[in-house]
């Protein structure tokens, strides 16, 4: 059974870089799937951030593309998100998910941007 | 960036039927957008109900069905249950390299 688990700092200062990791268990990160990040700001709707493939290929939301980097670590069977130059508007619950049919999601992790 | 629009809120009686829609600012929604539908309850991660317009996951109750209707993607709930009260989001794929979520519909069962 596939399980995804997000981890990372819950508090990030403005202008700094948000870094999260999604640990994958029950499947190989090298399998034929894309892996996504989605966020949910408080009181707002869901926003797709982007996705990464095992080869390192990526697709990003055009509105976030200039600040986002995603990568895969096959040795640790996890994938990562970096979002730089954060502001309060980046405060959200961040989810990782398997993009193939979006059939599996992590539980989400709250990241607050505040000084 | 496309804007994907849903009804802000809908109310359905227990046992009743309601249809949610999902429109795109770029034109008609087609099967090529591979429409998804998610249910999200407070404090929980989204749960996929429908993918590829009308395909259900093994955990999707049969009372949920997906379709294309009048240039939009649609999610129909037939025989609403109290536990169906939630926020529902659609998701559209644009050229296979960009996904856009809809604005969300809050469904009340009352």
Image: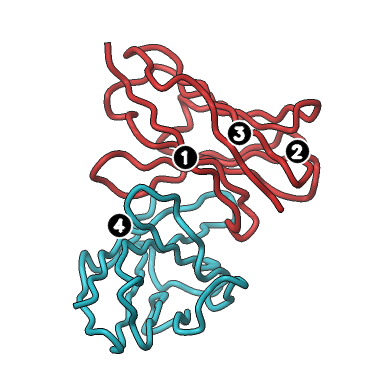
Chain colours: A red, B cyan
Label 2 lies in what chain?
A: A
Helix, strand or loop under label 3 = strand
Residue A54 badge: 2
Count of number-bearing discs: 4
Write down the residue under mark 3. Answer: A22
- Asked if badges 4 and 1 are on one and the same chain, I answer no
Alpha carbon separation for disc pair 3 and 2: 14 Å
Write down the residue under mark 1. Answer: A108
Taking the image as shown, residue B5 lies to the left or right of residue B61, namely: left
Q: Position of residue B47 (x, y in %)?
A: 48, 59
Write down the residue under mark 4. Answer: B103
Residue A98 badge: none
Helix, strand or loop under label 4 = loop
Q: Which comes before the other along the chain, label 3 or label 2?
A: 3
Classify 10 Å Cα crowding around label 3: few (below 14), some (14-19), many (20 and above): many
Alpha carbon separation for disc pair 2 and 1: 22 Å
* Residue at 49 percent of width and 52 percent of height: B99
């Amino acid at each position: 059974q596939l399980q995804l688990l997000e981890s990372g700092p819950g508090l990030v200062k403005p202008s700094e870089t948000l870094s999260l990791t999604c640990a994958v268990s029950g499947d190989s990160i090298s399998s034929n799937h894309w892996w996504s990040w989605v966020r949910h700001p408080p009181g707002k709707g869901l926003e797709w951030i982007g996705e990464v493939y095992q080869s390192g290929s990526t697709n990003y939301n055009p509105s976030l593309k200039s600040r986002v980097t995603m990568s895969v670590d096959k040795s640790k069977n996890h994938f990562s998100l970096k979002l730089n130059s954060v502001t309060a508007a980046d405060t959200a619950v961040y989810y990782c998910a398997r993009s193939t049919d979006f059939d599996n999601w992590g539980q989400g992790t709250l990241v607050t941007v505040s000084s | 960036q496309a804007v994907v629009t849903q009804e802000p809120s809908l109310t359905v009686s227990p046992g009743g039927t309601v249809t949610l829609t999902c429109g795109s600012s770029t034109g008609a929604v087609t099967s090529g957008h591979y429409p998804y539908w998610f249910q999200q309850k407070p404090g929980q991660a989204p749960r996929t109900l429908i993918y590829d317009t009308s395909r259900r996951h093994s955990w999707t109750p049969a009372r949920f069905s997906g379709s294309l209707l009048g240039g939009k993607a649609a999610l129909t709930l037939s025989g609403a249950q109290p536990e169906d009260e939630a926020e529902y989001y659609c998701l559209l794929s644009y050229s296979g390299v960009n996904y856009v979520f809809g604005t969300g519909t809050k469904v009340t069962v009352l």
